[in-house]
Image (cartoon, grey):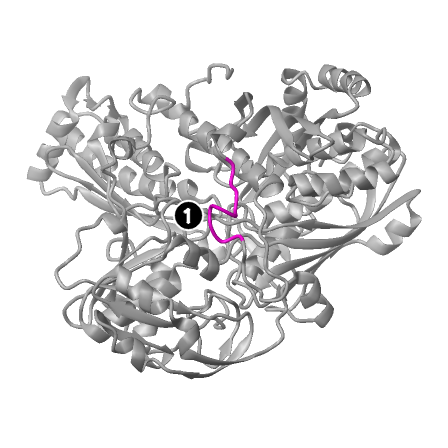
């Protein structure tokens, strides 16, 4: 079981926050009263939208015969690309993503037209007739990254990042290893699907309730599609039922289509995707294919490495460029690579345009070096942990992209986990067990994580917030981040409560709204608390300084000596209620609201050379996993997982442990069971529903699941010296995958390197077992 956790800074300073502080809207979730977009009362005259989808993976749309659909009872309109007032584009970075297809059909499931009807059922039934109203010339489709790479077909130019002379270092090395590896993609599978509700307002205004991680981007894209200015469009999001990156850029077509329909018909329009359509239309985590070669010495130390990474980008660029950039920047993971060459290719395929997913390319980059080191250890007959440890970064060494690793704690973190998990004794016990068990094999692995925190794009690393103190002492906060269940609003409320010395219950966080905080960044890249927490802190401190000056003016003493704690204000030896000080300030006409702003300092990035300091700091972690594999069926079970993760000085240990647990299980799903399958002829995603696409459940959690936070203050001036927790723990279940690989390898006495691809489904495990048994 988990050991008690030392109270966080906030919990010692203000007892109302800390490990016992639940999610700020937990009571609404428990009661079932939490309001999502589909729960909002529909305005009179609301219409419903459904999308007609391309039935082919690649083709030319010759004609559309929509009059029959328009004549159906209950159908109000059928819209095509020609009905969009502005440019037919919702591309996030590169303008290559049509809102509705026209001319070329790029993937099976691409939206071609929108049916607007009086009910959702009528709209869906009409849209389902899409195939019968299209005349299409079918063209050959490219479905895999390998095909795209062979054709030289990419959504963006290739990227190359290198240090030293990798080729000559490999050739001089005492030992060399060469191979290829596959890692599948992953569906976000948020509980709340994509949805937008557009409501026309006066003077060309448009209010869009959108389940999105990036309201400001949706504002700009909707304005673009409507041929209006940004000030005409208001985007609001109170909460999402999960996002995981799938609602960062890919909310765009649905927001734009709903808004275009609402403007054309001058009536509210709601577009809520069916789960199957959500799978067929939207993208997900990029799958990667690798070719690699490395040279190493007798200790397993990597002397030179070269890797080619090819992603399945899909039909458009979306966020594939930044994803590949992060993959290249995380190939090193926790390891010093003196001579290295990395090549990144974003393959253009006739599939959904892949996008952000928790980790944003980092997991795909880091798993490649882990696979190399795991194979090196097996070739040398060494414990993989020993090979990993000999390659760890030392103090002051720099990454291949030129950033010095100044906060390295991986040595002590791994040493602590090795001891607390009883790694060595369990390794010996597993070897003994496997020798006596011909069919059931156990495996064990310990893998580390070093994950950079900040957006790849420098200007995204900024945030704003508003803090209002009312004259009864209550506090309202609005910031640019979005709440998707991760506890961001809870942490921001804690920060404000701490700064003003009030109880957590005195602070309320309102819906994210582009009319309150402008030009916000996406809630992504694990920066939500770092950016918005600092912005809210800045606003709250300005108010606190004004209140302190007011209190000192009335009661004597120095404003700098005024203290705020426990809903009291200590001034010149007197203790006054916070509400009383606020009331006095109001009577004195002191400004009781403030805006706050924060921009992450010290960042630099040359996008062409792939050099600079793209990350403010690194988060570290490690995990040990033990599995049991049935060699007859390929079935496996996670018996135990031990996690030690670095979140700096935690703002809320309860939330951070929960995030670490959730990320571990989600990452385990990606690497072991969540398999995406496209039909090799039609190009249809055949795993497009819960019946065919399997995510982990509570039954997949190990019976022994120890999660502990590593005691370590952030060396950088982050919000209360905490560290991000959203994405880094997703890399911890590498240990599950390599524990499975360890168990499979034991069948051949650890003499053969198992060709295990991810996800390690039972079929994949059986294929690897067959290869090992054949020697």
Q: Give 422 or 440, whichever is nearer the viewer.
A: 440
Location of residue 712 in the rendering, given as x and y in whole percent from the top left corner: 54, 26
- Asked whether, in this view, residue 755 is left or right of residue 58, the answer is right
Q: Quadrant of residue 255?
A: bottom left
| View extreme (left): residue | 587
- Badge 1 density bin: few <14, some 14–19, many ≥20, Cα 10 Å: many
Residue that numbered label 1 is attached to: 243
Dot 1 lies on which element? loop
Residue at 47 percent of width and 27 percent of height? 657
Residue 727, image x and y in percent? 52, 41
* Picture coordinates of residue 539, whole percent (x, y): 28, 43
How far from the left and from the top, in percent, is residue 152? 70, 71
Q: Nearer the viewer, residue 226 or 193?
A: 193
* Region in magenta: 687-696
Q: How many marks?
A: 1
* In the rendered image, the vertical position of residue 368 relative to residue 113, given as above or below: above
């Amino acid at each position: 079981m988990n050991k008690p956790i030392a109270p966080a800074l906030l919990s010692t300073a203000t007892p109302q926050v800390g490990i016992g502080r639940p999610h700020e809207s937990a009571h609404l979730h428990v009661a079932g009263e939490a309001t999502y977009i589909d729960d909002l009362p529909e305005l009179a005259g609301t219409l419903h939208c459904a999308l007609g989808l391309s039935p082919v993976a690649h083709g030319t749309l010759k004609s559309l015969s929509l009059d029959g659909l328009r004549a159906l009872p209950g159908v109000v309109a059928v819209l095509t690309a020609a009905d969009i007032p502005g440019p037919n584009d919702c591309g996030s970075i590169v303008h290559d993503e049509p809102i509705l297809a026209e001319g070329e059909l790029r993937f099976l499931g691409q939206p071609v037209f929108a049916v607007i009807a009086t009910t959702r059922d009528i709209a869906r039934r009409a849209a389902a007739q899409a195939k019968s109203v299209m005349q299409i010339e079918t063209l050959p489709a490219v479905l895999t990254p390998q095909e795209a790479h062979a054709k030289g077909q990419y959504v963006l130019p290739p990227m190359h990042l290198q240090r030293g002379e990798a080729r000559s270092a490999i050739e001089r090395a005492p030992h060399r290893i060469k191979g290829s590896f596959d890692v599948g993609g992953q569906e976000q599978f948020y509980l709340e699907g994509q949805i937008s509700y557009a409501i026309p307002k006066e003077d060309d205004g448009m209010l869009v309730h959108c389940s999105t991680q990036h309201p400001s981007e949706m504002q700009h894209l909707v304005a673009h599609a409507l041929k209006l200015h940004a000030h005409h469009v208001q985007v609001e999001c109170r909460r999402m039922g999960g996002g995981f990156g799938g609602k960062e850029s890919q909310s765009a077509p649905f927001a734009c289509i709903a808004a275009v329909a609402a403007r054309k018909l001058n009536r509210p329009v709601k577009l809520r995707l069916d789960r199957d359509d959500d799978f067929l239309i939207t993208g997900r985590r990029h799958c990667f294919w690798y070719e690699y070669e490395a040279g190493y010495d007798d200790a397993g130390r990597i002397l030179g490495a070269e890797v080619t990474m090819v992603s399945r980008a899909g039909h458009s660029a979306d966020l594939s460029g930044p994803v590949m950039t992060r993959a290249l920047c995380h190939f090193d993971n926790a390891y010093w690579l003196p001579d290295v060459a990395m090549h990144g290719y974003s393959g253009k395929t006739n599939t959904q345009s892949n996008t952000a997913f928790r980790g944003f390319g980092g997991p795909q980059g880091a798993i490649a070096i882990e696979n190399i080191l795991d194979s090196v250890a097996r070739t040398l007959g060494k414990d993989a942990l020993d090979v990993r440890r000999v390659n760890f970064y030392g103090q002051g060494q720099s990454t291949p992209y030129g950033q010095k690793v100044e906060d390295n704690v991986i040595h002590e973190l791994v040493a602590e986990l090795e001891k607390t998990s009883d790694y060595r004794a369990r390794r010996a016990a597993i070897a003994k067990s496997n020798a006596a068990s011909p069919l059931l094999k156990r495996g064990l692995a310990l893998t580390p994580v070093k994950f950079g925190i900040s957006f790849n794009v420098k200007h995204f690393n900024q945030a704003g917030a508003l803090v209002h103190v009312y004259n009864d002492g209550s506090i309202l906060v609005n910031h640019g981040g979005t709440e998707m269940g991760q506890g961001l609003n809870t942490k921001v409320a804690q920060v404000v409560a701490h700064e003003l010395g009030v109880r957590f219950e005195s602070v309320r966080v309102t819906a994210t709204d582009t009319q309150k905080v402008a030009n916000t960044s996406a809630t992504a890249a694990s920066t939500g608390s770092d950016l918005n927490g600092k912005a809210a802190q800045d606003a709250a401190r300005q108010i606190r300084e004004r209140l302190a000056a007011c209190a000192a003016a009335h009661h004597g003493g120095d404003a700098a000596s005024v203290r705020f704690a426990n809903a009291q204000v200590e001034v010149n030896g007197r203790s006054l209620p916070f509400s009383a000080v606020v009331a006095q300030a109001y009577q004195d006409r002191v400004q009781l609201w403030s805006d706050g702003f924060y921009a992450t300092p010290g960042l630099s990035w040359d996008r062409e050379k792939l050099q600079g300091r793209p990350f403010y700091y690194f988060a570290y972690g490690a995990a040990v996993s033990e599995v049991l594999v049935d060699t007859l069926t390929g079935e496996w079970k996670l018996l135990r997982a031990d996690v030690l993760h670095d979140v700096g000085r935690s703002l809320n240990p309860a939330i951070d442990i929960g995030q670490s647990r959730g990320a571990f299980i989600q990452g385990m799903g990606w690497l072991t069971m969540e398999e995406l399958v496209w039909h090799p002829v039609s190009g249809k995603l055949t795993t497009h529903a819960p019946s065919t696409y399997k995510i982990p459940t509570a039954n997949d959690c190990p019976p022994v699941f120890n999660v502990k936070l590593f005691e370590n203050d952030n060396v950088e001036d982050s919000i209360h010296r905490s560290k991000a927790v959203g994405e880094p723990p997703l890399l911890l279940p590498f240990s599950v995958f390599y524990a499975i690989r360890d168990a499979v390898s034991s069948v051949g006495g650890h003499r053969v390197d198992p060709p295990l691809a991810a996800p390690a489904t039972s079929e994949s495990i059986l294929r690897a077992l067959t290869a090992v048994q054949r020697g």
